[in-house]
Image (tube, helix red, strand yellow):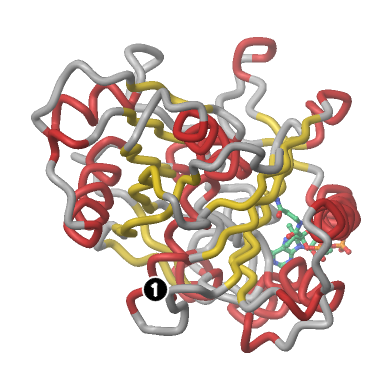
Amino acid sequence: MTNSSNIYSRIAGTGSYLPEKLLTNADLEHMVDTTDEWIFTRTGIRERHLIADDQVTSDLALHAARNAIESANVALTDIDLIIVATTTPDKIFPSTAVILQNKLGISGCPAFDIQAVCSGFVYALATADNFIKSGAAKCALVIGAEAFSRIVDWTDRGNCILWGDGAGAVILQASQEQGVISTHLHADGNYEKMLHVPRKTTGQDTVVMEGNAVFKIAVNTLDAIVDETLTANGLQKSDIDWLVPHQANIRILQATAKKLDMNMDHVVVTVDKHGNTSAASIPLALDVAVRDGRIQRGDMILMEAFGGGFTWGSALIKY
Ligand code: COA
């Protein structure tokens, strides 16, 4: 959706959090029949962080939220909307967003979760953007947070090597200046069974994935969303300063960069250190590149994601 109002939502601050425990490819060599070389060559992943036994998703979200609130320099009482994108909520209900709200020590503002798996952050950002553009919110806390390791089959070598845990957050504020320029969301439930946790139907509560088929569809779909986003805004590939993609597999990131004729220096890559943290991966990558000074105010950022459902989407942002 492109912006026809004169109110924009703008990223006022970013934050992130990674749990302390590291799981390296060498550790995985002791768990399944694999090698560091296979994992790195096929995925670009070297290590990932895992949530501690006594932590839940809202704990990761809380750390990331506090970082973002501090960097945006807003008061807790300014927050009038909380959206958490997660596939691994603390509980079936209430939502992780409500639990987070309480941990932050605030109450009253709307708080809810969004479930779009790896596309969750883009879905959450688009939702918060629309709240702000319509005047329904002025200062939104938007988070992607996952304890994905809790739904991974640690004996499935074609799958368990991919995932990691973490959280990333942004404060999105109403502004006269351009921020979120357009968002583009899609879903196609025909692909439900290619990437899912089939618990309710079969009792299995870990991820089942046709990795190779998912890979090919992801590359083609992300190609199309890049075209859709550029065309909707009348932009050229060269207008994009930074690609901040969902971090699934370095080969998927490279394919999207190629589509954009973009040097990998302009792609924010964290998959090597974080693995695939699902809904958390984009805000985590954004925070890393903002804090290390690569992304500067005024830069044009393209975010894109693809995940279970299938769901996919993009956001074009002037930082
Ligand atoms: N270590 C060593 N060998 C492995 C392995 C591992 N961890 N996992 C799979 N293999 C083997 C397979 O058994 C297969 O062996 P075979 O040829 O003897 O049958 C071979 O490697 C190739 O398997 P394949 O599944 O075709 O590999 P791939 O190149 O597609 O890589 C993924 C597998 C999972 C890394 C890759 O498909 C992928 O990243 N897919 C996208 C997943 C994704 O991003 N999902 C989330 C979307 S948000």
Residue at left 46%, top 65%? 286
Vertical order, 61 against 236 (above or below): above
Q: Nearer the viewer, residue 60 or 32?
A: 60
Helix, strand or loop at disc 1?
helix
Residue 17 at x, y percent in the picture = 29, 58
Residue at left 39%, top 21%? 112
Residue at mark 1: 290
Asked if residue 86 can be seen in this view, the reply is no
Asked whether, in this view, residue 307 is left or right of residue 102, the answer is: right
Q: Nearer the viewer, residue 232 or 307?
A: 232
Dot 1 amino acid type: Val
Asked whether, in this view, residue 14 is left or right of residue 157, the answer is: left
Q: Nearer the viewer, residue 132 or 56?
A: 132
Count of number-bearing discs: 1
Vertical order, 223 against 76 (above or below): below
Residue at left 51%, top 72%? 270
Q: Nearer the viewer, residue 178 or 79?
A: 178
Q: Quadrant of ligand 1?
A: bottom right
Residue 241 at x, y percent in the picture = 63, 78
Residue 221 at x, y percent in the picture = 86, 51
Asked whether, in this view, residue 236 is left or right of residue 45, the answer is: right
Q: Is mark 1 within 8 Å of ligand 1?
A: no
Residue 144, quarter of picture: top left
Residue 101, quarter of picture: top left
